[in-house]
Image: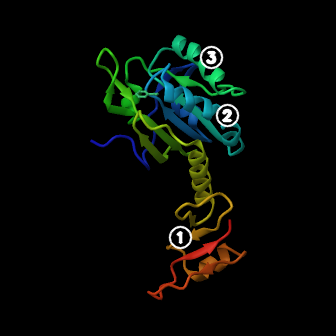
């Protein structure tokens, strides 16, 4: 059976975090949330990633996005580790909660298990999974990276912007799109509807097929 993926509602579960016990649905309700997992505390790539996430927290906050990390180790370990994270990325403050999952139950429910990574006792470890969850509690986008590849937080900001724009307007964002670039109008929108929806106008690209499906607009 496939695990949690785009369009699925996240499971309702309780978790211990560095900021107390949370209910996942309650935490994620009515706002965008980034749920991101890490193979383990006191590991090099994870230490850089959590610091970068803390550095970018302002970017996410400005966009109404909450952050919630996960590493399986216990809360005492997380609190010790946070000192290293903040020392490695000077000026950053890990202000977001980090879940613990000693029984590896949450990582299974959130489809964050890396089949190739095991701890010294043979227990599965989480991959570098990242789910962006909408205010409706549904997964809107997921990354799944192996332990050896750290994530790029500029890319996380970029996709948040894309998701939030596409939730407001009938647009999509093309390859290598960056915030501020023109977006494309979704194919289901007729030209007549596009005139009403996008009073700022749109530009249709001439293509060999003669089909007018590549329409750019600024939103
Ligand atoms: C790391 O975070 O650096 C890491 C963790 C597990 C395997 C490889 C790298």
Q: Residue at x 52, y 63 (%)?
A: 175
Q: Residue at x 66, y 38 (%)?
A: 56
Please state the quadrant of the image where ligand 1 appears.
top left
Quick one: which residue is furthest to the top in this view? 76
Which quadrant would the C terminus be assigned to in this image?
Answer: bottom right
Earlier along the polypeptide chain: callout 3 or callout 2? 2
Q: Counting other residues with Cα less than 10 Å from the Cα at mark 1, is it few (<14), some (14-19), or many (20 or more)?
A: some
Q: CA distance from mark 3 to mark 1?
A: 46 Å
Q: Secondary structure at mark 1?
A: loop
The residue indicated by pointer 3 is 83
Of residues 4 and 151, the one drawn nearer to the viewer in this rendering: 151
Which marked residue is nearer to the observer: mark 3 or mark 1? 3
Circles 3 and 1, Cβ within 8 Å, touching? The answer is no
Q: Residue at x 63, y 28 (%)?
A: 96
The residue indicated by pointer 1 is 186
On the question of residue 70 being in view, the answer is no
Q: CA distance from mark 2 to mark 1?
A: 34 Å
Residue 82 image position (x, y, % from top left): 60, 19
Left-right relation of 98 to 146 = right
Earlier along the polypeptide chain: callout 3 or callout 1? 3
Position of residue 80 relative to residue 146, above or below, is above
The residue indicated by pointer 2 is 55
Residue 153 image position (x, y, % from top left): 58, 42
Position of residue 1 relative to residue 87, above or below, is below
Which marked residue is nearer to the observer: mark 2 or mark 1? 2
Residue 169 image position (x, y, % from top left): 62, 64
Q: Which mark is residue 174?
A: none
Of residues 31 and 184, the one drawn nearer to the viewer in this rendering: 184
Circles 3 and 2, Cβ within 8 Å, touching? The answer is no
Model colouring: rainbow
Quick one: which residue is furthest to the left in this view? 1
């Amino acid at each position: 059976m496939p695990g949690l993926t785009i369009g699925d509602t996240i499971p309702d579960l309780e978790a211990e975090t560095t900021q107390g016990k949370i209910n996942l649905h309650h935490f994620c309700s009515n706002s965008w949330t980034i749920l991101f997992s890490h193979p383990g505390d006191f590991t090099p790539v994870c230490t850089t990633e959590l610091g970068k996430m803390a550095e970018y927290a302002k970017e996410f906050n400005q966009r109404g996005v909450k952050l919630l990390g996960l590493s399986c180790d216990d809360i005492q370990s997380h609190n010790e580790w946070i000192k290293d994270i903040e020392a490695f990325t000077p000026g950053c403050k890990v202000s977001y909660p980090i879940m613990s999952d000693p029984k590896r139950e949450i990582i299974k429910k959130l489809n964050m298990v890396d089949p190739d990574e095991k701890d010294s006792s043979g227990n599965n470890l989480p991959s570098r999974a990242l789910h962006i969850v909408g205010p409706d509690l549904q997964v809107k986008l997921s990354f799944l990276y192996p332990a050896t590849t750290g994530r790029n937080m500029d890319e996380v900001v970029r996709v948040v912007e894309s998701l939030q724009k596409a939730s407001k307007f009938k647009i999509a964002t093309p390859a290598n799109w960056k915030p501020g670039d023109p977006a494309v109008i979704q194919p289901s929108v007729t030209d007549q509807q596009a005139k009403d929806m996008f009073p700022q106008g749109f530009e249709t690209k001439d293509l060999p097929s003669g089909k007018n499906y590549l329409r750019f607009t600024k939103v």
